[in-house]
Image (cartoon, rainbow, N blue to C red):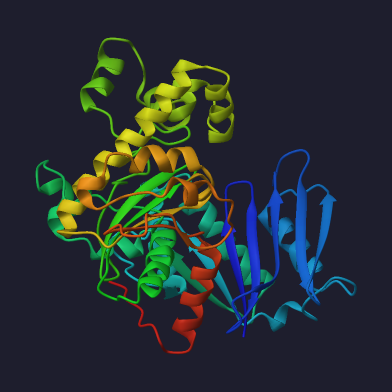
Amino acid sequence: MNIFVINSGSSSIKYQLFRMPQENPVCSGLVERIGLEGSSITHKTWKHGQELVTRESLTLADHQAGLHEVARLLTDPQIGVIANPEEIDAVGHRVVHGGESFKATTIISEPIKDKIKELFSLAPLHNPANYLGIEVAEKIFPNAKQIAVFDTAFHQTMPEKAYRYAIPAKFYTEKRIRAYGFHGTSHKYVSEQAMKKLNNPAAKIITIHLGNGCSMSAVDAGRSVDTSMGFGPVSGLIMGTRSGDIDASVIFHLIEQLGFSAQEVSNLLNKSSGMLGLTGFSDMRDIRKSITAGNKEADLAYDLYAYRIKKMIGAYVAVLNGLDALVFTAGVGENDTEIRKRICSNLEFLGIEMDEVKNEMPHTGTREINTENARVKIMVIPTNEELEIVKQCYELLTGENATEYD
């Protein structure tokens, strides 16, 4: 079964093609700067164990033009992996926000599209772009089932005490203002990988997704019971450009006393804060270089970043009433040895003991970096959101995964 996975952004399209049930992609690619000058496509295929890379610079007016070019590369006589677009059986779409309506992977119909449009206000930067990818894919791959995989769906198992806010109830009952959580596809994938590694389907796991965006999830027997992001993606941990949790009084002060507009505050907290605001850099590799050069502010920022995560670990151990594994994933979580070290230091009371030699060893796959006799496993598991999306699509189409839509 040929399943094409699309992650459509405002000016980009990430994609992978899988021949399920084989879980290795036969091709992948990235379309960048759609609708802007300097549009480009990087397209990779794997044939006979070799990776072939094609890079093209061209003008792409919109997402439809971009996906047409992708279809051309997929069917190219020299590097193509299918004969024509009709060979695509299904297209799996990442959709960031499913609200309370979508609890699982869902086949897209006109009513489903209408519901996704209704949720635009909850994710104005993401859902419209995801929706556009659906509409374009319907034209390019007319015979394929279109399937939505929602980032928020994994967290729909949270109990009400975890997702409600202490504001008048009508804001929840009438306006659905609550914590939804994000990065659910990643948290689901790595927690399932950890349960397999532990051979324990009832495992209590804390998953830590650290990239430019950062979030944590408390996972009990495969179910998300709490997560650090809330109504939107700015809350919780310190991130590349987002502030994470901040006293609401600061926002009132910025507006009422310092003359900021609501939009300026939103831009400040989403685009100019986090590690960028603290250090001038949003990329942790640049911050590490700055620390090595003796920058004390950069070193303090690292401590702030680790401290927020450490506090959340303590909270989630309490929520879970125990812990079997702590899982690091995503670009920073998988590659930054120093941040893992700072996060795990002085947590021996909780059974978290890092082997610093294992932590520093270069490795690209799943590994354990805890001491031999530690009560809690510390695991580094590379996330693979595209693989998780295609697995959920395949399970849905083969009848192994029931759709839940309210």
Q: Nearer the viewer, residue 381 or 215?
A: 381
Residue 149, percent across and down? 45, 67
Q: Nearer the viewer, residue 319 or 106?
A: 319
**Residue 345 as seen in the image, left or right of residue 106:** left
Quick check: 275 above or below 124?
above
Residue 36 appears in the rendering:
yes
**Residue 60 as seen in the image, left or right of residue 22:** right
- Which residue occupies the extreme bottom position in the image? 399
Q: Nearer the viewer, residue 370 or 398?
A: 370
Residue 41, percent across and down? 76, 53
* Count of marks overlaid on the render: 0
Q: Residue at x 36, y 16 (%)?
A: 260
Residue 236 appears in the rendering:
no
Residue 191, percent across and down? 37, 65
Q: Residue at x 51, y 42 (%)?
A: 336
Quick check: 159 above or below 340?
below
Residue 386, percent across and down? 55, 65
Q: Quadrant of residue 263?
A: top left
Q: Residue at x 73, y 48 (%)?
A: 61
**Residue 404 as seen in the image, left or right of residue 193:** left
Quick check: 352 above or below 250?
below
The N terminus is located in which quarter?
A: bottom right
The C terminus is located in which quarter?
A: bottom left
**Residue 270 as seen in the image, left or right of residue 37:** left
- Which residue occupies the extreme front position in the image? 373
Q: Residue at x 48, y 48 (%)?
A: 357
- Which residue occupies the extreme right position in the image? 78
Q: Quadrant of residue 376?
A: bottom left
